[in-house]
Image (spheres, helix red, strand yellow):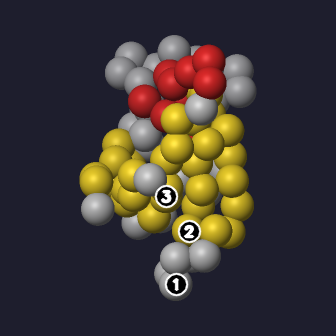
Amino acid sequence: MSFYEVLDVPQNNPCEKCNPCMRMRLMEMGFVLGQVIDVQEKMRGMYIVDMLSDNGNIVQSIALRKEELGRICLKEL
């Protein structure tokens, strides 16, 4: 298990005009400042990311591609 805190989901510079916007999509999923997550690597480059509540319970789980997870600025806890 690897626990991290979300620091930011920065916009690409220059903006690539993704449709839909990858930054907004990740933020709508809950990747916002201060969110604590647990990252587990799975097969074929997919990662299972568990969003954790303040008391450490799993609130939701999301599967992300390597490049999607790479868009999120994280701090290891």
10 Å neighbourhood of mark 2: few (<14), some, or many (≥20)?
some
* Front-lying residue, 10 or 36: 36
Compared with 24, 45 (above or below) is above
**Mark 2 = which residue?**
52
Residue 44 on image: x %, y %: 62, 18
10 Å neighbourhood of mark 1: few (<14), some, or many (≥20)?
few
* Front-lying residue, 19 or 62: 62
Cα distance, mark 3 to mark 1? 12 Å
Q: Write down the quadrant of residue 73 in the picture.
A: top left
Count of marks, rendered view:
3
Left or right? Give the position of 76 relative to 64.
Answer: left
* Front-lying residue, 17 or 47: 47
Q: Residue at x 70, y 21 (%)?
A: 19
Q: Residue at x 40, y 58 (%)?
A: 3
**Mark 1 = which residue?**
55
Give the residue type that dot 1 points to: Asn
Residue 16 on image: x %, y %: 51, 15
Give the residue type that dot 3 points to: Ile
Compared with 2, 46 (above or below) is above
**Mark 3 = which residue?**
37
Q: Write down the quadrant of residue 24 in the picture.
A: top right
Earlier sequence position, callout 3 versus callout 1: 3
Give the residue type that dot 2 points to: Leu
